[in-house]
Image: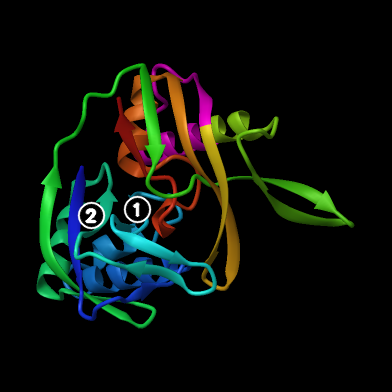
């Protein structure tokens, strides 16, 4: 289930900072906590039961050292989950408390609407609405460290497949019937975003997905890869 939240910046020519994932995550969880504490606990679970997009600014100007200057009122945040209780609680919470603060900007929620689920098959072309995070661990100078992977890395698809199978099984309580998929990268751009005091590297991508329909539908709802609850891994279906 997916919703679009329309956001209205309360000052003209506002500049959206590049690093705001944790601010959005924290505010959404805390807004839900005021009305449904149990759902807020689900939202903060490491199982990554939901995802959200970057704040989509359709008319903008990038200021390299500051952020994105907002040049229109057409600003959207997309939120998605296979758990309808999470989406319902978020929608109700932002209607009740409609201000969202990002950096020095205050946004007012002007509209919330439910989006129709597209028809997802065994072959799809996806474009990311937030970067996909895929990680492994490596020994470096005698210490175990997280290592971020990109689509050109040999381990990327194998690690992504294992991550999606694990998340699918944890959330649904069973393995998908069809467990295999592959992706063909059409375009790729590496990103680095600050989340909760540390940098997370991910991939903005357009890619062809071929394989398990169950995993494709699950990933559309809950995001591809890791750390989706912090605003990573959301995709849209494109023709």
| Residue at the disc numbered 2 | 86
Residue 54 drawn at (x, y percent): 37, 56
Residue 94 drawn at (x, y percent): 16, 68
Quarter of the picture holding the N terminus: top left
Residue at left offset 69%, top offset 34%:
153
111 horizontally vs 18: left or right? left
On whether residue 230 falls in the magenta region, the answer is: no
Residue 98 drawn at (x, y percent): 15, 74
Q: How far apart are marks 2 and 1 (CA)?
A: 16 Å
Q: Is residue 24 visible?
A: yes
N-terminal label among 2 and 1: 1
Instruction: Label 1, secondary structure: give it.
Output: loop
Residue at left offset 15%, top offset 76%:
97
| Residue at the disc numbered 1 | 53
Q: Are marks 2 and 1 in contact (CB under 8 Å)?
A: no
Front residue of 112/89: it is 112
């Amino acid at each position: 289930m997916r919703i679009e939240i329309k956001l209205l910046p309360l000052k003209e020519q506002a500049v959206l900072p590049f690093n705001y994932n944790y601010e959005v995550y924290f505010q959404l969880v805390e807004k839900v906590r005021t009305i449904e504490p149990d759902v807020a606990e689900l939202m903060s679970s490491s199982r990554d039961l939901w995802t959200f997009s970057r704040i989509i600014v359709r008319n903008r100007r990038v200021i390299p050292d500051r952020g994105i200057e907002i040049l229109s009122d057409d600003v959207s945040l997309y939120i998605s989950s296979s758990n309808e209780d999470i989406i319902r609680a978020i929608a109700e919470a932002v209607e009740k408390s409609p201000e969202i603060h990002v950096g020095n900007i205050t946004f007012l929620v002007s509209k919330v609407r439910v989006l129709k689920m597209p028809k997802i098959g065994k072959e799809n072309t996806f474009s990311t609405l937030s970067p996909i995070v895929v990680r492994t661990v490596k020994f470096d100078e005698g210490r175990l460290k997280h290592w971020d992977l990109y689509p050109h890395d040999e381990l990327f698809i194998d690690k992504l497949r294992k991550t999606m199978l694990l998340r699918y099984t944890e959330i649904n309580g069973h393995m998908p019937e069809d467990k295999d998929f592959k992706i063909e990268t059409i375009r790729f751009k590496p990103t680095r975003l600050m989340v909760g005091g540390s940098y997370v590297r991910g991939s903005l991508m357009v890619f062809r997905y071929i394989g398990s329909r169950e995993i494709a539908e699950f990933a559309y709802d809950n995001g591809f890869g890791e750390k989706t609850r912090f605003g990573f891994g959301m995709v849209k279906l494109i023709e």
